Amino acid sequence: MEGTGMKQLLLDLRELRVEAPTSLAPAVLAEVGLADWYAPLDTALGQMFVAFGAEGITMVDRAGDVPAFMARYRDRTGRSVQRADVVPAALLRRPRFDLRGLTAFERDVLTATQQIPAGEVRPYSWVAREIGRPGAVRAVGSALGHNPIPLLIPCHRVVRTDGLIGNYSLGGNEAKRTILAAEGVDPDELERMARHGTRYIGSDTTHIYCFPTCRHARRISDQHRVPLRSAKVAESTGFRACKVCRPA
């Protein structure tokens, strides 16, 4: 009876067996450092490949030529990458980024860029100042141009110091305009203000000035909006800098 009972128990356990989610193996193997994986992700710019490993997300690239993508991945990381069905949901909810292989300066630039909220932009000079290198504006632009994890590390939210939108590694100016518009920025209005020399918006009631896309600037009603050409002009006419977007 004992042997028969054990057999029945094993049969019952088999009945309870369920298939593991298809994303489980890639997530577990990546977490323990045994493999790097990539999966497609739909974005406002179309489908992208998102690669990830034990330390987090490693690369974002346009989907398409898989062998070319895998070659680029090996060139950048020195590791191979395998296909997964999906990017683990937890990794997208609370992204971790693997920035190994970048210089300390490049990591600082990308870390500062992550502070820019969706629907807002900042100039390259802002990033340079945030990392304590105000004279390194060109180097900041170069670091962002080589961002291995665009979209998720939002280099598209960094614009030229003159306010114009500028270029973008994932498809140039039009792609940058598309992703900003998807986040709620009006690219045409942003560039119109830039061409008219408006760098900041002030409120004549609070006497605070902001970057034009700052959430506080967007709340200023039309009759109280004051266009400002520079921080020097703003402060010489009695305005003080917003503590949220930190224009100066």
Image (cartoon, grey):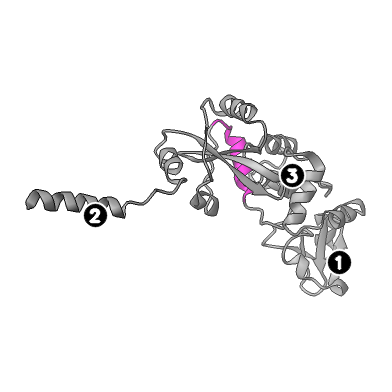
Residue that appears at 83% across and 49% down: 163
Numbered disc 1: secondary structure: strand
Quadrant that contains the C terminus:
bottom right
**Which mark is drawn over residue 12?**
2
Question: For the residue carrying disc 3, how many other residues have a C-alpha within 10 Å: few (<14), some (14-19), or many (20+)?
Answer: many
* Mark 3 vs 2, N-terminal side: 2
**Along the horizontal axis of the image, is 238 left or right of 53?**
right
Between circles 3 and 2, the one closer to the viewer is: 2
Residue that appears at 78% across and 69% down: 207
> Tag 1: residue type?
Val
Pointer 3 residue: 124
Residue situated in front as seen by the camera: 133 or 180: 180
User: What x and y, as percent, mark residue 58?
Assistant: 55, 37
Pointer 1 residue: 226
Helix, strand or loop: magenta stretch: helix
| Magenta stretch in the rendered image | 101-114
Q: Is residue 248 visible?
A: no
From this view, report whether residue 198 is shown above or below residue 207: above
**Along the horizontal axis of the image, is 189 left or right of 142?**
right
> Tag 3: residue type?
Tyr
Residue 76 highlighted magenta (yes or no): no
* Mark 1 vs 3, N-terminal side: 3
**Which mark is drawn over residue 40?**
none
Q: Quadrant of residue 184?
A: bottom right
